[in-house]
Amino acid sequence: MPLDRPIPAFYCCYLLRSTVSRVSVYVGSTPNPVRRLRQHNGLAKGGAVRTARTKLRPWEMTCIVTGFPSHIAALQFEWAWQNPHITLHIASEERLQHATQKKRSGHPKRPRHSVSSLLSNLHLLLRSPSFSRWPLEIRFFSKTVYQAWVRWTKTVKDPIQDTIRIIKDFPEGGGKGSDDEDAEKGTSNAIIYRRMANLPIDYEAQKGHVEKAQDMVDFEREGSCKLCKQDLEHSSGLYIICPSIGCETVTHMTCLSKHFIEKQDQDELVPIVGKCPGCNSELRWVDLVRELSLRMRGQKEVQSLLKVKRVKKGKDNALSQTIVDSSDDAEDEEDDINEEMDTMQDFASQSVAAPLGDSWHMACDPEESDAESIASSSSYLKTSKINAGPKQKPIPTLHKTIEDSDWDDAEILD
Amino acid sequence: MASTDIFRIPSSPLKQSFAMSSSPLPAPSELYQKKVPKIIAKRDSIAASANLFSPIDNTPGFVKVSQLDLRNLDPSRVVSTVKEDKLATKVPTKVVAKPRAKNHSTSTSKISDEKLSAAPKKTATKKSQVPKEPLEEQKVKKPRAKKADLNGESKPRKKANDAVVDLENGDGSIVKEKKPRKSRAKKTPEDLQTKLSGSVTKASTKPEKSGSKQTVIQESLNIEAECVDYGLVKAVKRKANWSPPHKSSITGLQNAGSIAGDLTARSPGSDSSTSNSFSNLLGSFGFTNIETTNSMTTKQSKETGVVRKRKLLELVSMNATATNAPAEAATPKTKAPKKKARTITDLATSAFNEEKVVEVESQPAPLLQYFSYQTTERSTKGGINGPAKLRSKSPLKRVKKGSSAQAPILLSPESAMKQAQHQDFIFGTSSQLAREESPTYLRDLHEAMQASNVMFEDPFDDPFKDVVDEPSAVAPRGRLRLSSKKGGLWSAGARDAAGSLLDVEMVDITDSPTVIRQQTPPRVPATTAPIDDVWHDVEADNSVKETIPEHVLGTSSKPGPVEAAIRLQLQGSPAILSPTKTKSPKRSTQTGVKAAPTVNPVAKKGKASGDQMPDFGAYTMFQLQKQIASYHFKPIKSRDSMIAVLEKCWEGQHARTALGSLTTNTKPSAKSNKDKEEVHPEPKSPKGKGRPKKDTTSDIPTSPTKLKKTVGGRKKADADHSDDSDVPLSQVRKLNKSPKKPTGRTKKKTADDIYDSEPQLTHSPPRRRPSQIRSPPRALQLSPSFSTTDVLPASSQESQESQESLFKHITRAIKSLPPTKDPSKPTWYEKILLYDPIVLEDLTVWLNTGALGNVGWDGEVEPKIVKKWCEGRGICCLWKENLRGGSRSRY
């Protein structure tokens, strides 16, 4: 019954478009877009039927929506995106597409999707109350698609929530449309793959936070809630720890949420952003809670996360540089000790706390998405990470925090 | 019948020995055996020992013996060792009986040894014997004691003993085990007993006893002669440990003491003497009783045992021996003649009666009363419970006095009828009847029931009920009341055309004084006097309210007259007034308290709606019936209920037409819009009142089934109205808030006009509040059901507002949760904060089971509503149940 996994590090809904026929589109969801794309394109087993037609291959991911707090949430969104004509998340009067015909089975027939229609529906969904407060993020890999999006947003009077980031993840090419198209084609897969490879599909971004929190919890340094001043007993409550370096703010989750919620949003339950009561830094609620969920339910992931870090450190300083997150000295010391302990461990396992949803299922092909990959298995993670690792490491990702040069020094202290 | 002798020892009141006459001895004896030990068990050996040093006990030997005897009587002892014990007991008793030192010493020593060793022993037989011993063998024991050599003695006794043993052993293996031993051990006790019995009942010695017995008797006689006095003392002491023997036995014992001298005189086989002595000894220890017949003996032994015990105690406490004996003998004697039970049955019943009378008086009394009075009819309502109650008690007293069946006073037929009419007949089981703590309990109960029924009576009941002549009013009132009360109960569940609970329309009669006064529960019985007042007042048409207080004070509530008055005002047709007036008083009487708040609003409603809705109250019965039939209702008998139904139908129709196309959506019409605003400030009060109001409404005895005919949209329309009916109560209670009403009303008026047959609303804005609080949930319930795939159509404004209020409550409920102490069990709030997908079913259950109540929301929420709430807040929610009926196990 209770959720047995932490908030996924990465789960996205993507809009797939055939590079061959720019009209054919496909919507799916995955915790690992690279893998998924390869599946769609036949490079890996487990693709979708709709994308199995060789004529339409290779496919490309034009844009993805990420940041879902749970795989179920992502699936719900995906379904709503695929079925805007019947989804309840969109009010009938707002519907852009309506079911005009009915299938034999009695279900209303789905109108044909196009990029524009999907984009418009996406925009609509993101404006709906169901999803507007989700910590989502749209990332466009395709310039044309992004431009279509922009065009659409201009026509629509209601903007989407500003908390939803729209990221352009494509090389800035020529200004003209046609040029863009060509440019895109040129860039095509390699670049896209590269860019996608840089996606933070693991918990690396939270590593520092995780470590810091782990520290505090291990040493029972929770102290008292910053907001309600109550003493925070170890392991008797859900506490949020500020990820900022040096900030020792720990609060009750409920206290902080109330602190985050603006006065005008008193009817809301879940905050989106807020300021740390201790260090006043702008924080996203989802990040805080993700770390908390890792602490609560993702011990495995945390361990693998930390282990990899250690292993990587021990192995390769260069690698560690790319992976290392910001950390304070306390953590360094902590890590050193851990490193010593872990030197005996398997170096080969570079398993990182990858998104739990990731799993290689060779056997069955989830039709629309590889949601079934939710069944997590660390071994799969490891293997996947191995593939992903090399891609990640050489290329500094946008989301990796600046490494701390002290890190290297710390290693020397071995 | 040595066995009988043995068992005759009434150490305890054995009631099982009733049928001992010709029945095989074993049965009663067995029972007796069983009984005896049980009874004896109660005796504390220590208590017995306490007697050791009582001044009564002159000789330690005696005491010891009694002590030992009593100890042996302790049921806790193993039966198997009865024989030894018996021996021991027998021996000591015998020994003790005899002041002979040698015997005493030896026997006592023996006995002590034996008894001590036999401490754990216990046998039914032993006990039976043992108690017998002290009782009977007081005197006999001495001789027995002499015969320390039990075996020697026992030979002749063996037969008797064997018989006894057989009898005694009849009960169980335990007894059987002791058989061999018993035969010996018992012998002495048995012999003793037999001897005792023989000795004690010398006068009543039965030829049944074997010759050995007689010899024993003779011996015992001798012994008795010596130790009569001591025997009594011992008996007393021994008895102290037992349950008291029957009085007769006590008297018998005492008589035995006194008769000691006569024992020799009495021949063992004289029945007459036995009977004499028997009767004499009834109050005594009852040796004679037992002697005569088993049943008698046993019974009387019990009785005597009881008596004996009491006497023994008295003896002990009073430190009187022979002196008390005669005194005690006297008292039992007084009792003895009282029961001249010549037959077993008489004995049995007499004994039973005596005791029962003392203890349980109520039980037989009512039963007997019923037998004697030959109750015919039963008046559950309307009758006067008092006299019946008293009467039910009186036979008790009579029985107490011991008179034979209550001598029915011969009455003339008329008076008898009258008496019967006044009689309150209460049927019930003995235990039920016996449970009455106070004599007026039943009457009070009835009155309370009536009062409560009256409260819920249909205000639309025939107002003429009380107008009818007194004598006829009694009957019709009874009938009507019955029907109305039944209708009241029935109508409590009545439903209107829409299938919702049919509430008694609560019409606010505008003025608080009226209502206030009406709120005082009127007395149940109605008289014609107030009715007349009502007439006058109604005609005056000025102070309708005045009638109310009178009615309140009187019996009938004003709803009737008030309603009539209102209608009068509305219609200004005095011609119609009379029927309505006449009706109203009747109606008022029936409604009572409930009517007070309910009818007022109803009346008011009638008044308010007079513009549009025809005054059904003015219709004749025929017209009403036609109307009812037009709505396809089954004919309703009560006029009031017809009127109410028609009103509801009218409102439903009008509301529907006003609402027009909004058939699918719930019609919490525009009025609820305005109400929402008012709802927010006081969500609790209307809700709270709405609820109880609902419970008290709907007296109209329309069958729910009929009401369900109109369904669907009508349902919704009427749902509102049923809600509306809730308001009147709240409105009534919120009389001071009248200033609010107009404001709220005016606000709503504009929007409401479209939707409602509103004039009525003008007077009862608060009425809307609970309705709107309720209707939104209902709206939400209904609308979602219509489209599963399609997006819920935007409900009308009011429903949205009410929904918002509900949502706010949910939010509050969830946010008010304190953080959990267990990280693995987050509260709902925390789960939401963690972005956990929320299972709708679980959350709904949690909300319904108290969470919403804590924040002041009375209704329940449905999962669909909760889903809407979640989606509005951006909470990811999911159903536990799959579309195909399965349920998710893993998230």
Image (tube, rainbow, N blue to C red):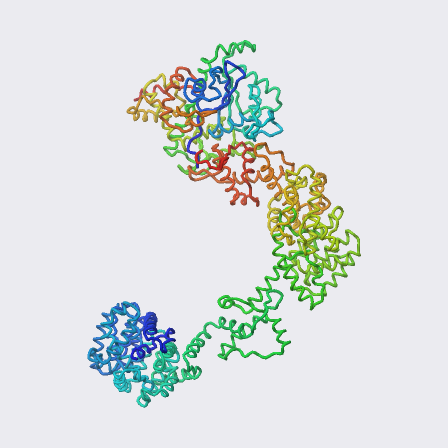
Question: x, y percentage for residue B478?
Answer: 65, 64
Q: Nearer the viewer, residue A82 or B747?
A: A82
Up-down relation of residue B501 to residue B485 (above or below): above
Is B471 displayed left or right of A176 in the figure? right
Q: Can residue B884 be seen in this view?
A: yes
Question: x, y percentage for residue B285?
Answer: 35, 80
Up-down relation of residue B40 to residue B772 (above or below): below
Question: x, y percentage for residue B233?
Answer: 32, 81
Is B783 displayed left or right of A223 in the figure? right
Quarter of the picture containing the C terminus of chain B is top left
Q: Residue furthest bottom?
A: B265
Labels in figure, total: 0
Q: Is residue B740 visible?
A: no
Question: x, y percentage for residue A252?
Answer: 46, 35
Up-down relation of residue B737 to residue B268 (above or below): above
Is B568 displayed left or right of A8 in the figure? right
Quarter of the picture containing the N terminus of chain B is bottom left
Would you identify the image quadrant in which residue A199 lies? Answer: top left
Would you identify the image quadrant in which residue B585 lies? Answer: bottom right
Residue for point 46% across, 25% down: A367
Q: Nearer the viewer, residue B639 or A107?
A: A107
Q: Nearer the viewer, residue B787 or B726?
A: B787
